[in-house]
Image: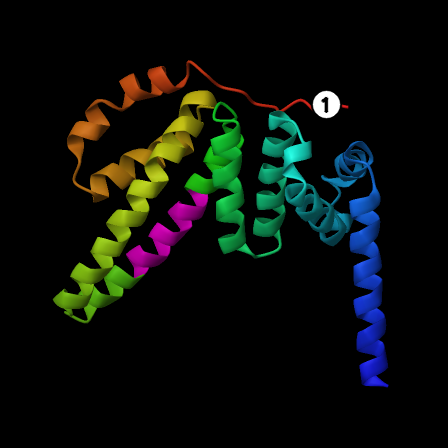
C-alpha cells in the first residue's frame, strides 16, 4: 500500500512538472504573477517560480529578476533562508538598480551578526578569549557582507533604523572612517534606484 502511494505521488509530481513544461512561458509567468503575493499559495508559487527559473532563457531580464527576488522572499518566509540568499544575490546581479533584495539580504546577514554577537558575549563571560577571537573573525566576515547591501537599501529608501544599524556595525568593526564617509557613499548609491520591477506580458 505504501509503495503504491509513493508511486502515485511520484506520478502526480511528474505530471505537474510535464504540464508546467508544456505550458507556454507566457502562460506560466501569468499563473505565477497572479498568485505570487498570496500567503495561502506559497508552496504553489514556489513551484511555479522554480519552473520559471529552469526556463530562464525564455524570460526577459526584468521577469527573471522579479522571479529570483520573489523566490528568495518565499524561501525566506518559509524558513529556508540559506536557499533565499542565492536567489536574492541573483536578483541583484540581474537587476542591480532594484534595491528591495539588497534590504532583504542585508537583514539576513544582520540576523547572523546578532547571533554571532550573542555567542561572542557568552565567550566573553566564560573568559574564553580564543573562542571570542574566532567568533569575532566570523562576525567581521558577515558584517562586511551585510554593509554594502544595507547601504544600497538606505540610499534608495532611507530610514533611521537602517542607518543606525549601519553605523553600529561599523562601530563594532572599529571603522570610524567608514562612518565619516557614509553620507557620501549614500548619495552616490542613490543615483540609480528602482523600487518596482514592472511585469511584462
Closer to us: 89 or 108? 89
| Residue 39: x %, y % from top left | 73, 47
Does 177 appear in magenta? no
Instruction: Pick the quarter of the image with the N terminus.
Output: bottom right
Residue 120, compared with residue 42, is above or below; it is below
29 horizontally vs 181: left or right: right
Query: Total of numbered circles in the picture?
Result: 1
157 above or below 49? Answer: above
> Mark 1 — residue?
200
Residue 99 relative to residue 155: left or right:
right
Instruction: Indicate whether residue 111 is drawn in magenta.
Output: yes
Magenta residues span 107-118
Q: Nearer the viewer, residue 94 or 183?
A: 94
Quarter of the C terminus within the rendering: top right
Position above or below: 154 against 11 = above
- Residue at the location (14% across, 67% down)? 130
Helix, strand or loop: magenta stretch: helix
Q: Is residue 100 left or right of residue 60?
A: left
Q: Residue at x 60, y 27 (%)?
A: 61
Q: Residue at x 54, y 43 (%)?
A: 87
Task: Name the image quarter holding residue 52.
Answer: top right
Amino acid at each position: 500500500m505504501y509503495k503504491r502511494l509513493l508511486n502515485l505521488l511520484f506520478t502526480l509530481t511528474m505530471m505537474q512538472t510535464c504540464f508546467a513544461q508544456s505550458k507556454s512561458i507566457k502562460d506560466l509567468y501569468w499563473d505565477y504573477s497572479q498568485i505570487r503575493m498570496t500567503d495561502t499559495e506559497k508552496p504553489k508559487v514556489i513551484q511555479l517560480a522554480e519552473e520559471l527559473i529552469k526556463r530562464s532563457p525564455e524570460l526577459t531580464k526584468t521577469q527573471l529578476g522579479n522571479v529570483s527576488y520573489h523566490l528568495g522572499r518565499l524561501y525566506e518566509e518559509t524558513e529556508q533562508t540559506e536557499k533565499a540568499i542565492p536567489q536574492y544575490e541573483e536578483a541583484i546581479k540581474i537587476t542591480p538598480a532594484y534595491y528591495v533584495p539588497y534590504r532583504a539580504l542585508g537583514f539576513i546577514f544582520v540576523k547572523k551578526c546578532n547571533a554571532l554577537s550573542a555567542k561572542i558575549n557568552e565567550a566573553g563571560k566564560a573568559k574564553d578569549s580564543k573562542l571570542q577571537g574566532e567568533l569575532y573573525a566570523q562576525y567581521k566576515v558577515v558584517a562586511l557582507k551585510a554593509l554594502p547591501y544595507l547601504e544600497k537599501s538606505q540610499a534608495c529608501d532611507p530610514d533611521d533604523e537602517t542607518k543606525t544599524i549601519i553605523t553600529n556595525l561599523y562601530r563594532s568593526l572599529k571603522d570610524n572612517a567608514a562612518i565619516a564617509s557614509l553620507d557620501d557613499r549614500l548619495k552616490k548609491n542613490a543615483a540609480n534606484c528602482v523600487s518596482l520591477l514592472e511585469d511584462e506580458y
